[in-house]
């Protein structure tokens, strides 16, 4: 019997994507898995439609949006209670290859030191172009980045699992032992950087983090839209500082982040006319830094952005 694996799919007003993802999961060739859909207080009738069309999935309803961290932690607790050997966090805006879960679990079972494993993730609209083949952390600069970003897949990562610094929360298979020994996602993050911090925590507890090249899925991500979002920019700015704090990053990480990047960006967006369109992002960045200095974490209620 293959290990019991529970897939956790977080939904927040993303009915169409969630239905397509659930449909792709029905073609998995892995014999021992269950799906938990955690709804984060959707208002688009997601709950009723999902319950009707995918009655085999366990549906957990949160009364409000608990973010990526809070919503997935609800699912992880259910997975632990149901005796899962592995839990798979999976974004609802993905579609998977039929063999992707089998490759992930097989890799994890081959080495008991592996705590977290992730697949190769491609762009949905450019199916041979890599978005993530794991992640790396530059501790000197305090930066995280995707490995293989925007590169065509020409077999450069081989076939064997390879160690990486982190895997994206878009799709991460987590051994039960990791959850029991290190805890769950840090809910202070709400969204963004939480998976990198969890992977660092797992590594420091003695677990390996690996990318499994043969496992694959497609992600409906649009980097341009995310980069232009003031809300996303807020979380990315604030949570990078939380990541540095939570992981005990050294002084070079802090200096590079605060001065070489944050201060330089703010000055550029303030003084250069070509960046007048970045006023909303600039204001959010300032608010994010201020909130981090005050240790105001978790969900952020976005204020009205003035036109100054």
Image (cartoon, rainbow, N blue to C red):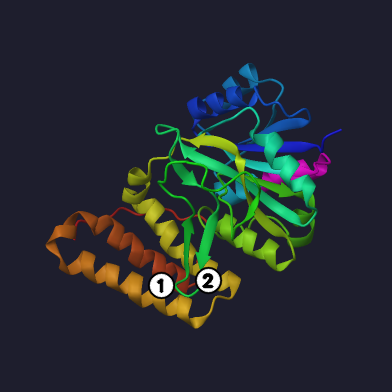
Q: Which residue lies furthest to the bottom in this view?
A: 251
Q: Residue furthest top?
A: 52
The one nearer the camera, 13 or 28, is 28
The one nearer the camera, 70 or 269, is 269
Which stretch is magenta? 73-86
Are dots 2 and 1 in contact, CB under 8 Å? yes
Tell me residue 44's x, y (percent).
49, 28
Corner quadrant of residue 6: top right
Residue where numbered disc 2 is placed: 244
Please determine whether, in this image, residue 22 is positioned above or below residue 259: above
Residue where numbered disc 1 is placed: 257
The answer to whether residue 286 is magenta is no
Corner quadrant of residue 128: top left
Residue 156 seen from this side: yes
Q: Residue furthest left?
A: 273
Please identify the quadrant where the N terminus is shown. top right
Q: Residue at x 58, y 76 (%)?
A: 248
Q: How many labels does the image show?
A: 2
């Amino acid at each position: 019997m293959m290990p019991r694996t529970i897939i956790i799919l977080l939904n927040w007003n993303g009915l169409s994507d969630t239905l397509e993802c659930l449909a792709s999961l029905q073609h998995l060739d892995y014999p021992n898995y269950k799906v938990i859909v955690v709804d984060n207080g959707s208002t688009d009738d997601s709950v009723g439609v999902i319950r009707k069309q995918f009655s085999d999935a366990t549906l957990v309803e949160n009364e409000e949006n608990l973010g990526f961290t809070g919503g997935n932690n609800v699912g992880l607790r259910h997975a632990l209670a149901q005796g899962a050997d592995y839990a798979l966090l999976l974004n609802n805006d993905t579609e998977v290859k039929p063999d992707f879960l089998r490759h992930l679990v097989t890799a994890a079972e081959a080495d008991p030191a592996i705590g977290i494993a992730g697949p190769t993730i491609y762009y949905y609209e450019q199916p041979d172009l890599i978005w993530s083949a794991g992640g790396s952390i530059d501790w000197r600069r305090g930066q995280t980045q995707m490995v293989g970003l925007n590169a065509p897949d020409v077999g450069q990562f081989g076939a064997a699992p390879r160690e990486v610094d982190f895997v994206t929360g878009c799709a991460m298979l987590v051994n039960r032992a990791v959850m029991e020994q290190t805890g769950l996602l840090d809910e202070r993050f709400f969204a963004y950087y939480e998976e990198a911090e969890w992977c660092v925590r797992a590594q420091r507890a003695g677990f390996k983090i690996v990318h499994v090249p043969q496992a694959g899925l497609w992600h409906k991500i649009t980097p341009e839209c995310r980069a232009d979002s003031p809300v996303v920019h807020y979380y990315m700015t604030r949570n990078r500082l939380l990541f540095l704090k939570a992981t005990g990053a050294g002084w070079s990480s802090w200096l590079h982040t605060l001065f070489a990047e944050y201060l330089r960006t703010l000055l550029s967006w303030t003084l250069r006319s070509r960046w007048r369109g970045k006023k909303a992002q600039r204001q959010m960045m300032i608010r994010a830094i201020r909130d981090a200095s005050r240790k105001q974490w978790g969900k952020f209620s976005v204020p009205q952005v003035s036109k100054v």
